[in-house]
Each structure stands twice: as C-alpha cells, then as structure tokens.
C-alpha cells in the first residue's frame, strides 16, 4: 500500500489543521483540510498532532520480549521480599516443577540483605530459579539452576561477564516462540509511536532479524563484541540494509563494554565506592578497547561503547580520540566536568536512557554521594553541543519513549521533587532526542510518523506518560491505529 492520506492532523508541535498525503514512503503534500483525490488508505487523525516517529536507541529485544512474561520483582526492597514476590506469583500461577522459574527487575543496590543461592534453595527446594536484576548485570541463581548450566558458585550471584555468559547458557523458549514474542513486543512498541529500534541483544542479531523478515519497526542490528570477526567476514558495515527485510533492517554499531553498572557497584569511577576501596570494574583495558575499536572502524563498523562511571567515560572518550572515529557512548551516567564538552568535539553521540535517572536516584545518592551534580547530566551535554539520543535499555526500563521524555524534562517519576532539576532539558529537545534528531514534519520527509491524541508539548509529565497514540506509520504503512 503506497498511497496514504492522513486527514485532519496538525503537523508539528502547535501546528494548524491539515491533510497530509504520503506516497511511496514519503510525505508528498501538506494541504488545508478537505483535500480531494484518491488514496488507497485514509486515516482520520481527529485533530491530533502529527510528529516524526519515535526511536528507541537501546533495546535488548529478545530479553524485553521475554521479560514481559517473567515474574516481576521490581517492588522488592530486600532479598527476602524478592522471594516473597516469587512465591506469591507461583502460588497464584503454578508452574511445572521441572520448569525454570524466571524472575526479573530486582534492584539490590539499597537492599539491607544480600541475595544468595541458599535463600532460593530454602524457599524452593530443588527448583531451578534464575532471577535477573533490572540492569541485567546481575544474575541470581539457585543451586539447581547452577547445576543446570554446569556451574558451581559460592553465592549463586553472578556479575558482569559471568552473568552474561550464564544467561546465554540458560534454557530458552523455542526459536519460533521467541520470534512470536518479539513480533508482539515490536507491535506493542508501535502502539506507543515507535518506528525504529536499535537492538542491543547479546546475540547474532543480524541472523535473527534476517530470519524474522520485515518487522513492524525499523531495526538496527548491533554487533556483539565476540562477533566482530564473523561480521567482517560477512562484509557487513554499519548502515548496510539486510536483504529480505523490505529495507527495514540494517547493520548497527559494534558494542563494547568498558565497565559494569551503578546498581552492582561495578560502574568504573575515579573515586571508590563508599565503605571500601573499589572504584568499580574495568571490563576492557584501554589498549584492548582501542585495538577492537580501530579494527571495527577500519572495516566500516562504528563503535558503541558502554560506559557508566566517570572513569569509564574518560577511557571511552580517550579511545575515540586515539582511533579518530565517530560513534556512541551508551549510558554516560556519571561524567567528569572536563569530559562533557569532549562528546561534541569528538563527534561522539551521548546515547542515554532518561528513565534510569529517577529509577537510580536513591542508589546514586548513596554510592555516588557528592558527585550527583554531574550524574545523568543531560542539560550539560546538550548545552555543550553534544547530540543526545534516547533509549530505554528495555527491559531495564519499559520500551516506551514517552516515559523517557517525561523523565528528561521533569527529573522525577513520582511525587518527590525533581532530582537535580538543573539537568532537565526542554520538551522539544527531549522529543528530538527520541525521534532520531527529527524536529518537524515536512514535505519530502520519510513517512515514519505518529499521530498523538493531543499536542504533547502542552502536557504534564504524568499526562505524557499516558498519552494515547492514535496512529503510527512506518515507511508509509500503518502499523498501529486506534
């Protein structure tokens, strides 16, 4: 279907009522309401606002699709409470004794007690239990789950590389089931106005999306660290369109980790964490980081470097300067003041996740005490000239860009006062950071669009989070309509 007419929409923030015609995936005209002429499909916008489609620039797609079916543990305020939530769910929804019990979403950075495999064994004797932290950097396993993957561990609490390798060993749903879950998750994202997703799954995303065919959103397939040689052999370069995808699936950047995360106290910092002498975990030494970045860039792959702590960000920026290539730093949660202007001067995108700031404000106050004025520094980055791109890091946060936009402009997501409100950014900038940099709707634009029920620029943060999206258009095709 190459011919679409959007009736009674308001192009852009504060726009006037108009009819918008789309042909062959592009906006071809914006005229006064009541335009005539044939259209293969007509969508009535009912006076809603027509905006560029949203981009979630950081998603772990399979994990997000699976997370939607896991036992939620985000409300747990202790290891004991996590187990209570687990037991309550299993009591209400019994599962076969032989089935792996999977929970997700716990945040133990402020817990008064510590997770341990023995707690799971006492609560569910002999059951295989795998519990994922909200940031995906911690995996809490029962003795039976450790045995299932052929491992032994003194506590059953695996961090960083151990966590990720163990995750890959755990039983998963059949491929066709996973693909169905992924399709459902992408369709749900389209219902929130999403037209593009950058898939950071730690897997062969190129092979996975080649198998899945044309999705309900554009997909950028991030290349995992261990797949660099294979990707070079395939001849894939960042931005290449994958065949059989209808032009919707492309090769993404090459992902590397410098450090861990705040909640696990493995984000690599210049100063040690309170109560000890550990500054966090350096996951990739600078010389190895530079070597891999250079090899990737020499073969057309742009680096995407995970860096959360301030020292990790310094190392990442130093590596970009040494290699002399553009790319992205994912997260950039704590920055040294001298590093803020380097993003713009080096051409490095600050790929951030605004929903993490209200989620992590309490643990940041404890573990980054005295440094939080430079944590999640979105306004400082914006004013320095850096390009911001927003993502959710789903399942760390829900795949819903409106939540991220609301967090970026308000610096809170509950009844508490804003946290470091001086780092809040204007709505128009937050929307652009969630739209791949697009700020308007104009003739000639790619028809990746959404229609919202109201002009979001006049809404409160709470109303933004609940804003209905009445239609989503991908490459001129309707992927969602109310």
Image (cartoon, rainbow, N blue to C red):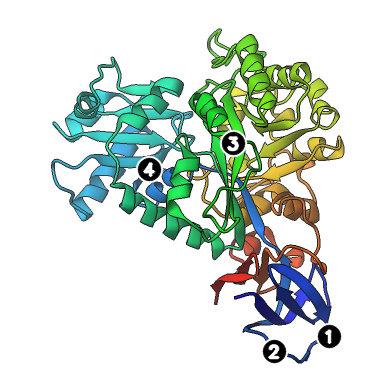
Q: Earlier in the sequence, mark 4 or mark 2?
A: 2
Which is closer to the viewer, label 1 or label 4? 1
Label of residue 32 in the image: 1
Marks 2 and 1, Cα distance to the nearest angstrom?
16 Å
Q: Residues within 10 Å of mark 1 (few under 14, many from 20)?
A: few
Image marks 4 and 2: residues in contact by CB distance under 8 Å = no
Task: Look at mark 4 in the image and give the residue it sits on.
Answer: 73
Q: Earlier in the sequence, mark 2 or mark 3?
A: 2
Task: Look at mark 3 in the image and give the residue it sits on.
Answer: 236
Residue drawn at x 30%, y 34% is 130
Which is closer to the viewer, label 4 or label 3? 3
Q: Residues within 10 Å of mark 4 (few under 14, many from 20)?
A: many
Which is closer to the viewer, label 4 or label 2? 2
Q: Earlier in the sequence, mark 4 or mark 3?
A: 4
Marks 1 and 3, Cα distance to the nearest angstrom?
45 Å
Q: In the rendering, at what x and y percent does residue 16 appear?
A: 83, 78
Q: Residues within 10 Å of mark 2 (few under 14, many from 20)?
A: few
Q: Which quadrant of the structure image shows residue 283?
A: top right
């Amino acid at each position: 279907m190459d011919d679409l007419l959007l009736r009674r929409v308001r192009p852009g923030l504060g726009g006037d009522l108009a009819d918008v015609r789309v042909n062959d995936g592009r906006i071809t005209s914006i005229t006064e309401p009541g335009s005539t002429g044939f259209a293969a499909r007509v969508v009535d916008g009912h006076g809603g606002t027509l905006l560029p489609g949203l981009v979630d620039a950081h998603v772990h797609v399979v994990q997000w699709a699976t997370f939607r079916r896991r036992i939620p543990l985000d409300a747990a305020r202790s290891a004991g409470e996590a187990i209570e939530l687990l037991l309550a769910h299993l009591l209400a929804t019994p599962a076969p004794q032989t089935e792996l019990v999977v929970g997700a979403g716990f945040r133990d950075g402020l817990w008064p007690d510590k997770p341990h495999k023995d707690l799971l064994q006492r609560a569910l004797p002999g059951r295989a239990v795998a519990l994922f932290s909200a940031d995906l950097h911690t995996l809490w396993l029962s003795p039976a789950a450790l045995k299932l993957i052929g491992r032994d561990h003194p506590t059953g609490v695996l961090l960083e590389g151990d966590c990720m390798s163990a995750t890959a060993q755990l039983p998963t749903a059949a491929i066709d089931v996973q693909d169905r879950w992924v399709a459902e998750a992408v369709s749900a994202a389209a219902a929130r106005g999403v037209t593009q997703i950058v898939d950071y799954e730690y897997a062969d995303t190129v092979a996975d999306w080649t198998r899945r065919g044309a999705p309900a959103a554009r997909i950028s397939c991030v290349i995992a660290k261990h797949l660099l040689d294979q990707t070079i052999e395939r001849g894939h370069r960042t931005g290449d369109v994958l065949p059989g995808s209808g032009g919707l699936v492309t090769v993404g950047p090459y992902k590397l980790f410098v450090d861990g995360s705040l909640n696990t106290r493995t984000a690599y910092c210049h100063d040690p964490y309170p109560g000890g002498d550990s500054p966090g975990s350096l996951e990739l030494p600078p010389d190895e980081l530079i070597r891999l970045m250079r090899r990737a860039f020499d073969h057309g792959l742009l680096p995407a470097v995970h860096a959360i702590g301030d020292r990790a960000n310094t190392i990442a920026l130093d590596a970009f300067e040494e290699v002399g290539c553009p790319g992205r730093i994912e997260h950039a949660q704590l920055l040294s003041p001298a590093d803020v202007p380097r993003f713009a001067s080096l051409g490095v995108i600050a790929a951030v996740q605004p929903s993490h700031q209200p989620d992590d404000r309490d643990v940041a106050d404890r573990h980054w005490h005295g440094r939080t004025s430079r944590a999640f520094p979105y306004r400082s980055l914006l004013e320095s000239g850096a390009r911001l791109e927003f993502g959710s890091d789903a399942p760390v946060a829900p795949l819903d860009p409106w939540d991220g936009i609301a967090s970026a402009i308000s610096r809170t997501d509950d009844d508490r006062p804003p946290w470091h409100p001086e780092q809040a950014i204007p709505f128009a900038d937050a929307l652009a950071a969630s739209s791949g940099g697009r700020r308007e709707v104009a003739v000639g634009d790619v028809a990746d669009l959404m229609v919202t029920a109201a002009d979001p620029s006049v809404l409160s943060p709470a109303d933004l989070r609940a804003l209905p999206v009445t239609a989503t258009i991908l490459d001129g095709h309707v992927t969602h309509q109310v």
